[in-house]
């Protein structure tokens, strides 16, 4: 025979089982979400540590650039590197120095080098001039007259 009170109890039990299953699924979902959040937080911490390391490296590189810039002086139309003992090494191209490159100047061909100055040029091509002088590579190359007494012996030639 059919017992309606048993049906009510069975439905109540079924509701309780469904609620328990839903709560269990919700708990599993909550744990899964919590686990993913912890994973994302761990990744964020790693990224923050990398950012701090990159900032420190950036500061070190900027300090090195500043040390290099402050170790260069300009006189007699060219740049000179100041060495740790206070002496100067050079001459270096001012155009290249402004671009962050220490390009040593070389003797310019076709000039009288028997005078009291060396006529120097940069091995890298720097065309100057405005308007027609600079069109199509027609500008003139920079020339630096530097007193010979500023350049170490045997740098370019043996002096007579």
Image (cartoon, rainbow, N blue to C red):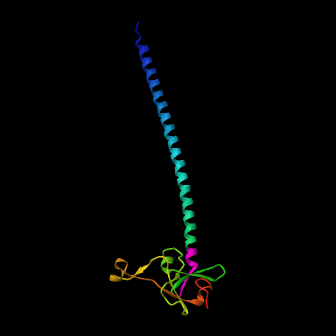
Task: Report the quarter where the N terminus lies.
Answer: top left
Q: Nearer the viewer, residue 100 or 135?
A: 135
Residue at the limit of the structure toward the left, as seen here: 132
Residue at the spot 41% in from the left edge and 10% down from the top edge = 3
> In which quadrant of the rendered view does residue 22 lie?
top left
How far across and down, in percent of the image, does residue 108 sit? Answer: 50, 84
Residue at the limit of the structure toward the top, as seen here: 1
Residue 69 included in the magenta stretch of the image: yes
How far across and down, in percent of the image, does residue 143 sit? Answer: 47, 85
Tag count: 0
Residue 43 included in the magenta stretch of the image: no
> In which quadrant of the rendered view does residue 134 lie?
bottom left
Residue at the limit of the structure toward the bottom, as seen here: 115
Q: Nearer the viewer, residue 43 or 152?
A: 152
How far across and down, in percent of the image, does residue 152 sit? Answer: 62, 85
The part of the chain drawn in magenta is: 66-76
Residue at the spot 54% in from the left edge and 69% down from the top edge = 62
- Is the residue 59 above or below the residue 142 in the image? above
How far across and down, in percent of the image, does residue 123 sit? Answer: 49, 77
Q: Nearer the viewer, residue 81 or 128?
A: 128
Residue at the spot 37% in from the left edge and 78% down from the top edge = 137
Residue at the spot 55% in from the left edge and 56% down from the top edge = 50
> In which quadrant of the rendered view does residue 15 lie?
top left
Task: Report the quarter where the C terminus lies.
Answer: bottom right
- Is the residue 141 above or below the residue 30 in the image? below
């Amino acid at each position: 025979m059919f017992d309606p009170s048993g049906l009510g109890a069975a439905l109540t039990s079924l509701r309780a089982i469904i609620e328990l299953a839903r709560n269990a699924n919700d708990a599993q979902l909550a744990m899964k979400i919590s686990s993913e959040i912890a994973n994302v937080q761990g990744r964020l911490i790693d990224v923050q540590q990398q950012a701090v390391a990159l900032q420190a490296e950036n500061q070190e590189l900027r300090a090195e650039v500043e040390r290099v810039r402050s170790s260069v002086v300009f006189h007699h139309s060219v740049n000179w590197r100041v060495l740790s003992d206070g002496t100067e090494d050079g001459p270096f191209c001012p155009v290249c120095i402004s671009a962050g490159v220490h390009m040593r100047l070389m003797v310019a061909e076709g000039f009288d080098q028997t005078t009291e100055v060396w006529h120097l040029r940069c091995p890298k091509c720097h065309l100057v001039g405005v308007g027609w002088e600079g069109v199509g590579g027609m500008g003139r190359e920079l020339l630096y007259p530097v007193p010979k007494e500023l350049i170490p012996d045997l740098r370019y030639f043996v002096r007579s």
